[in-house]
Image (cartoon, rainbow, N blue to C red):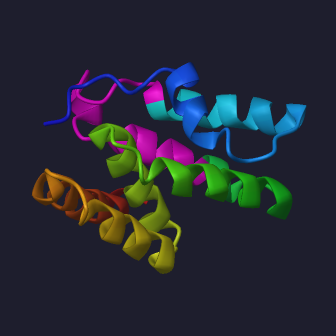
Amino acid sequence: MLTKKLPSLSQLRLVSLRFPVIKSEILLEEEVLELYSSPVIGATYNNTFGEENIKKLVKKYRGFDEQKKRTMQALIVSYSKSPDLATSFVSVAVLHALGMRREVEDAYQWAQDLDDKEKFIHHFDIGKSLAEYFT
């Protein structure tokens, strides 16, 4: 079970600093990051594996116009390669739910270079199953 609290906004923002950002994108990033961290994974029975986070992120993405979808996709793709297991796990689940196969494959490829690659890959597999069930 993933009970680790997700990284803070400032920690995750470091991942996305390589993207040129404008104020509206920063606000969007803050919205997205809030959906990663609330509710806390493992804090309730209904969110044991981040099910609520995954559902809310997918719903948010589907409600956006094309420009915001591109921005959110870029954020989720960058988070899918986070060394924080919970962050990358939720990201891979969301990408899978949205049918972004190439991005999911890229995350799996990235995980191959990790010392604990088996743990990440196992959680990615769980995330994909959750995405199929809950979205």
Q: Nearer the viewer, residue 69 or 21?
A: 21
Relative to 124, residue 14 above or below: above
Q: Looking at the rendering, in which quadrant would you find the C terminus?
A: bottom left
Residue beneath the point at 33% across and 42% down? 83
Q: Kindly indicate the quadrant of the structure image that contains residue 6.
A: top left
Residue 68 placement (x, y as % from top left): 79, 53
Q: Nearer the viewer, residue 82 or 73?
A: 82
Residue 88 placement (x, y as % from top left): 37, 48
Residue beneath the point at 80% across and 39% down? 25
Q: Which residues are magenta?
A: 37-59
Q: Nearer the viewer, residue 113 or 24?
A: 113
Residue 17 placement (x, y as % from top left): 67, 38
Residue beneath the point at 24% across and 25% down? 4
Relative to 132, residue 12 above or below: above
In the image, 6: left or right of 57? left
Q: Kindly indicate the quadrant of the structure image that contains residue 117.
A: bottom left
Residue 28 placement (x, y as % from top left): 74, 37
In this rendering, the count of numbered labels is: 0
In the image, 21: left or right of 10? right
Q: Is residue 45 magenta?
A: yes
Relative to 25, residue 77 above or below: below
In the image, 1: left or right of 57? left
Q: Looking at the rendering, in which quadrant would you find the N terminus?
A: top left
In the image, 119: left or right of 11? left
Relative to 31, residue 109 above or below: below
